[in-house]
Amino acid sequence: MISQRPIFVTEPHLPPLQEFIPYLEKIWTSKRLTNGGPFHEQLERELADYLGVQHLSLFTNGTIALVTALQALRISGEVITTPYTFAATAHSLLWNNIKPVFVDVDPATCNLDPSRIEEAITPATSAILPVHCYGIPCDVDHIQRIADTYGLKVIYDAAHAFGVKQGGISILNHGDLAVLSFHATKVFNTFEGGAIVCPDAKIKQRIDYLKNFGFADEVTVVAPGINGKMNEVCAAMGLLQLKHMDQALDTRMAIYRRYQAAFQDIPSLRLLQGPAGLEWNHAYCPLFVGPDHPASRDEIYALLKSHHIHARRYFYPLVSSFPMYRGLPSAADGHLSHAHTLAEQVICLPISATLQPEDQERIIELIRQTAL
Ligand code: T4K
């Protein structure tokens, strides 16, 4: 009998429950629940090692980390960003009273098109906030050249880019800061969580103050900080997850390759590809349904849903079309034509370390039928 188990786009990867119990016992015994506890400190060290970065500061989630990264660098005025992303990217600007300026994306990578950035710079521009969308790296060299020329900061929204390397180097080392998300739906999860990757100890210190209300010590508050601290249960989850990471990443790659093999003879269906030399994490599996495909993207989405397969249209609708952004001059449709096309064509297929081969076969079979 064919399984009808619901399948989700990004099912969390949970290590065996019995492996988590000893961590919980330690927390219960020590009564240290949060505020820079031992698991928090250990996870900061182990993650920096694993990711190949100098320093990182753990956060309660990726959104608060983005908001804090902007504050840490005292960004104000206007910031150039992508409309093809999750709401949190642009929202982090509004939370800091910064005006987002949307620039179109490169359809091959889904990332901010560097050749369109300069025309969007004004005297009020203070930074660029690109996203390594789906874990595919931005054109970091081109973006840095522009930032250096105009004296702008670069903060990467690297929510999808856990463990991604290019030429053997972590993509998280680019920009002034890079922000990760460890949400349940991410490649690496701590239930909720995130981090800011920092190039030096000084900026990490400032960020550590900012995530703890601005406290530098018991009696000194140096900034109007927020509560962005990761608690000990989430940090313990991270330590345990890290032990299973390599296997989870291998499974994701195998799933992606099966999708690739299954659709390669259908030119109206395009899977996103990474550039040569990329160690990708396969954070998402976006499939673009071309206008010449016999079924539309939404028909495929509905077909899968009717079989309890919950694909998602990340990132539709575009952030620039949300009510709080659509009045901006940079949100005008003609200005963001590639982003609009991608948003109309994309469907993210289920990919996770827990997706069973027989379930993937069901997904593939249903989609292949739409090409007949
Ligand atoms: N920047 C970018 C580029 C981002 O993509 C995100 C987050 C952020 C910043 C902000 O980082 P965080 O503050 O979240 O750390 C989900 C996630 O909530 C969000 O983290 C993520 N991006 C976004 C792309 O996806 P929703 O609203 O689509 O989530 P939801 O609840 O509909 O879940 C998606 C699917 O995952 C469901 O069909 C079921 C499955 N699922 C979900 C959860 C929460 C599970 O199986 N178990 C779970 O616990 O936003």
Image: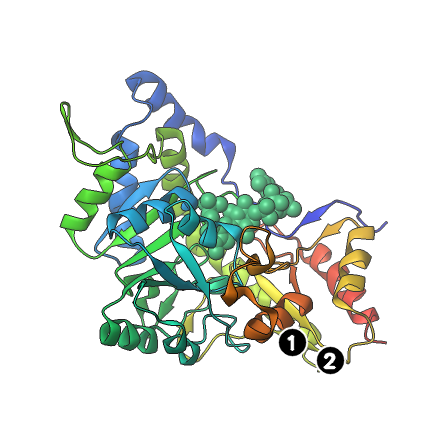
Residue 343: image x %, image y %? 63, 66
Residue at 48% x, 58% y: name it: 249
Residue 165: image x %, image y %? 36, 67
Q: Nearer the viewer, residue 165 or 20?
A: 165
Q: Amino acid at mark 2?
A: Ile
**Secondary structure of the residue carrying numbered label 1:** strand
Any part of residue 272 in sight: no
Q: Nearer the viewer, mark 2 or mark 1?
A: 1
Callout 1: 10 Å neighbours few (<14), some, many (20+)?
some
- In the image, residue 127 sits, relative to residue 140, either above or below, namely above
Residue at 43% x, 54% y: name it: 159
Taking the image as shown, residue 154 lies to the left or right of residue 105, namely left
Which quadrant, please, contains the C terminus? bottom right
Residue of label 1: 270
Residue at 75% x, 59% y: name it: 301
Residue of label 2: 266
